[in-house]
Image (tube, rainbow, N blue to C red):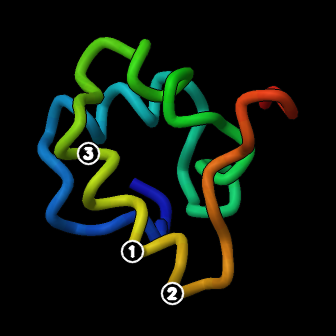
């Protein structure tokens, strides 16, 4: 797998779901709303809780619901 800055502790189903959606970096995660990510099979609230601080550490956040992907 290519280098990624996604948190290593993400569960395998979440990693597969993100990869299937073409999300391999936190910058790509930031283009998605929490709701859109939660709609992916394999991504749940725990994944969002793990991604949020990783995004914040890079000065990023989830896309706003009114802004789309």
Where residue 61 sits, quadrant-wise, is: bottom right
Q: Residue at x 26, y 45 (%)?
A: 47
The mark found on residue 61 in the picture is none
Q: Which residue carries the number 3 mark?
A: 47
Q: Residue furthest front?
A: 66
SS for callout 1: helix
Q: Which residue carries the number 1 mark?
A: 53
> Neighbour class for label 2 at 10 Å: few (<14), some, many (≥20)?
few
Does the residue at mark 3 contact the one at mark 2 (Cβ under 8 Å)? no
> Neighbour class for label 1 at 10 Å: few (<14), some, many (≥20)?
some
> Neighbour class for label 3 at 10 Å: few (<14), some, many (≥20)?
many
Marks 1 and 3, how far apart at CA: 11 Å
SS for callout 2: helix
Q: Quadrant of the C terminus?
A: top right
In this rendering, is residue 39 above or below 6?
above
Number of callouts in the render?
3
First in sequence: mark 3 vs mark 2: 3
Q: Is residue 55 left or right of residue 13?
A: right
Q: Residue at x 67, y 53 (%)?
A: 30
Q: Is residue 3 left or right of residue 63?
A: left
The mark found on residue 57 in the picture is 2
Residue 62 pos. (x, y %): 62, 51
Q: Is residue 3 left or right of residue 31?
A: left
In this rendering, is residue 67 above or below 53?
above
First in sequence: mark 1 vs mark 3: 3
Q: Residue at x 27, y 55 (%)?
A: 49
């Amino acid at each position: 797998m290519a280098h990624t800055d996604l948190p290593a502790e993400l569960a395998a189903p979440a990693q597969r779901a993100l990869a299937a959606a073409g999300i391999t970096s936190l910058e790509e995660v930031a283009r998605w709303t929490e709701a859109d990510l939660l709609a992916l099979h394999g991504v749940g609230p725990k994944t969002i809780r793990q991604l949020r601080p990783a995004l914040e550490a890079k000065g990023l956040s989830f896309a706003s619901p009114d802004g789309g992907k």
